[in-house]
Amino acid sequence: MVLFMAKIILEKLLTYETIIWDWNGTLLNDADIGHEVESILFRRHGVTPLSKEERARLFRFPISDYYQERGFDFSKKSYDELSREWLEIYESQVKLAPLFEGVPEMLGELRQKGSDQFILSAAPQDHLMDMMLHHNLADYFKAIYGLENARADSKVGRGLELAKDFGVNPETSILVGDTTHDLEVGKALGCSVLLVADGHHSYDVLVDAHHNVISSRRGR
């Protein structure tokens, strides 16, 4: 049985043949851990951390630009080094992050309906595969597309690869994510987009950018 809050999303997806899921902040409830890890990294390098509310408003892709806006000097430490350092801290904590309520049930109902489901994430591919095993989710997805490194750059290119590899029809497909970058990816693919404000961008940021936004699965 799909739990009540997950039904809010499920009801918007049932008419689509293909669902492309973002991972962090969309299926995995990791925004708080992401904020904590970011704060640790920022303090290590003398950059003032943001509050959760500030981060939800200012966070953006590409992360390298976001870091420079926050005050990082890549001539002192390269973005590649910083991104690897962030991932090391994150991986020490991320398995404490739960899935959002009702995720397995929701994915199961979509699978039973016959929908093709994919993961498209800016996280490293190896990390994603490890997380799928940890949460026992891999069997729900036709394929899992992450990046080759820890830089968290744009995932538009990987999205286009996914669409080409599997012949995704944009007219019957929807991308579900939690940031304005997910909206950019959906536009690049030509598919519908649903944004959910439980993750790394606030509702105000998302609703300013897009019409199809769920304020929260947590009843906020």
Image (cartoon, rainbow, N blue to C red):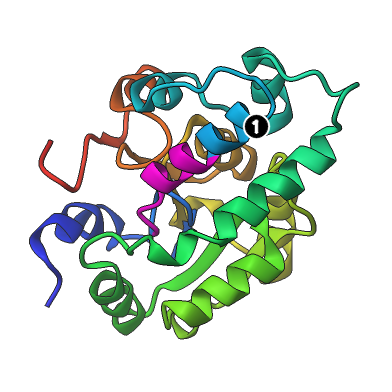
Left or right, 80 with reference to 39: right
Q: Is residue 33 on the magenta stretch? A: yes
Left or right, 72 with reference to 2: right
Of the pair 43 and 134, the residue shown nearer to us: 43
The total number of labels drawn is: 1
Q: Quick one: quadrant of the N terminus?
A: bottom left
Q: Residue at x 40, y 73 (%)?
A: 115
Horizontal and vertical percent for residue 117? 47, 70
For the view shown, which residue lies furthest in the right direction?
75
Of the pair 91 and 101, the residue shown nearer to us: 91
Q: Is residue 185 on the magenta stretch? A: no
Residue 17 in sight from this viewpoint: no
Tell me where the magenta segment starts and ends, as one range: 28-37
Q: With respect to residue 129, does 25 lie above or below?
A: above
Horizontal and vertical percent for residue 98? 33, 63
Left or right, 69 with reference to 199: right
Q: Amino acid at mark 1?
A: Arg
Q: Quick one: quadrant of the C terminus?
A: top left
Left or right, 29 with reference to 12: right
Of the pair 104 and 34, the residue shown nearer to us: 34
Say few, some or many: other residues with alpha carbon within 10 Å of mark 1 (under 14 / 14 to 19 / 20 or more): few
Q: Quadrant location of residue 126?
A: bottom right
Q: Residue at x 47, y 56 (%)?
A: 173
Horizontal and vertical percent for residue 24? 47, 52
Q: With respect to residue 9, does 99 lie above or below?
A: below
Look at mark 1 in the image and give the residue it sits on.
Answer: 44
Main structural element of the magenta stretch: helix, strand or loop?
A: helix
Of the pair 156 and 16, the residue shown nearer to us: 156
Horizontal and vertical percent for residue 185? 60, 40
